[in-house]
Amino acid sequence: MLHVLFGVLGILFAVALFVDVLNAHEGNYRRIKKLSSAVAILIVLAFLIGGYWYVVYYGADREIIKAGKWPWAHNYFMEVKEHIFFSLLLLSIYLPIAVRGVMPLNNTKKKNLILGICALIILLGLFMEGAGGIISKGVTMGLGR
Amino acid sequence: MNNSHMGKYAAGFGLSLVVTVLLNAVILVIKEISTPVMSVMKAILGHHWTTHGSLLIVIYIVLGCLFSATGLKDRLDSGKLLKYIIWAVVISVIIIAGFFLPGLNITATIKC
């Protein structure tokens, strides 16, 4: 479940970046760049590890969920999660490119671009975590616990 | 250059992000309603999701490089790009979440 850890850390770093951009000044430009790279690296790690786990091991869990009391945990939440995740991944990869492309952050529109991308990453990331929880509970329900 | 304009890569990969996020939803619908497309995607990399993700990343990089090479940065400012990105994500989420809505049969579970 290492991908969950990297996902949560990615969300937390995006929150930190959001706050830093709100208070952007020359003194924190370097940290803003580092935070944006960290978000991208963490979400890519979550993608690689979560993707490997999904492709190799999820099949058995899927059968348990579909035969259990919460088949919609797979039929809806897993299906939606695995596809919306691509938007989160692409937004995260774009974040450091956007940050470096709009520096210096001396304009409201430039700041808003980074804030908007961070907000989307945080919202989609929270959905991933919530959907992951429902899918795990779907397995538990399928096992009759 | 307008003060809210950005670098060529931020503009190019920003527009590429918009296109790729929308394409994600389009590819999803096509592969789910077309069995031959789903079979081809499974055959290419062993799993439809792996092929789907790899395809999107390749398209994102290729379009990003192409758009960056054009004079896009002079025509696109940060405000416009943010609007495009938000709308692309919202439309994509609505299509994906809406497409699988029939699978959300919670009421049947509650009745049981």
Image (cartoon, coloured by chain):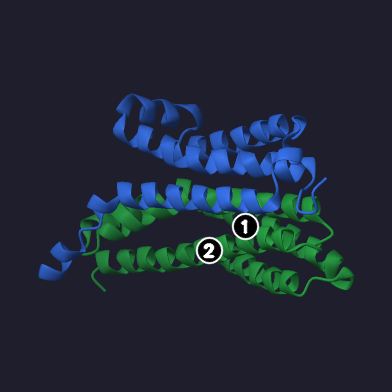
Chain colours: A green, B blue
Q: Position of residue B70 (x, y in %)?
A: 74, 30
The residue that label 1 is drawn on is A43
Horizontal side of A114 relative to A60 (left or right) equals right
Instruction: Residue type at mark 1: give it.
Output: Ile
In the picture as drawn, the residue positioned furthest to the front comes out as B2
Which amino acid does the dot numbered 2 rest on? Gly
Residue B6 spot, x, y in % from top left: 77, 48
Compared with residue A22, is residue A100 higher up or lower down, i.e. above or below? above
Counting from the top left corner in percent of width and height, residue B8 is at 78, 40
Identified at 37% across, 31% down, the residue is B38
Q: Secondary structure at mark 1?
A: helix
- Identify the residue position indicated by label 2 in the image: A125
Q: In the rendered structure, the residue with mark 1 lies on which chain?
A: A
Q: Is residue A78 left or right of residue B74?
A: left
The quadrant in which the N terminus of chain B is found is top right
Q: Is residue A18 above or below residue B36?
A: below
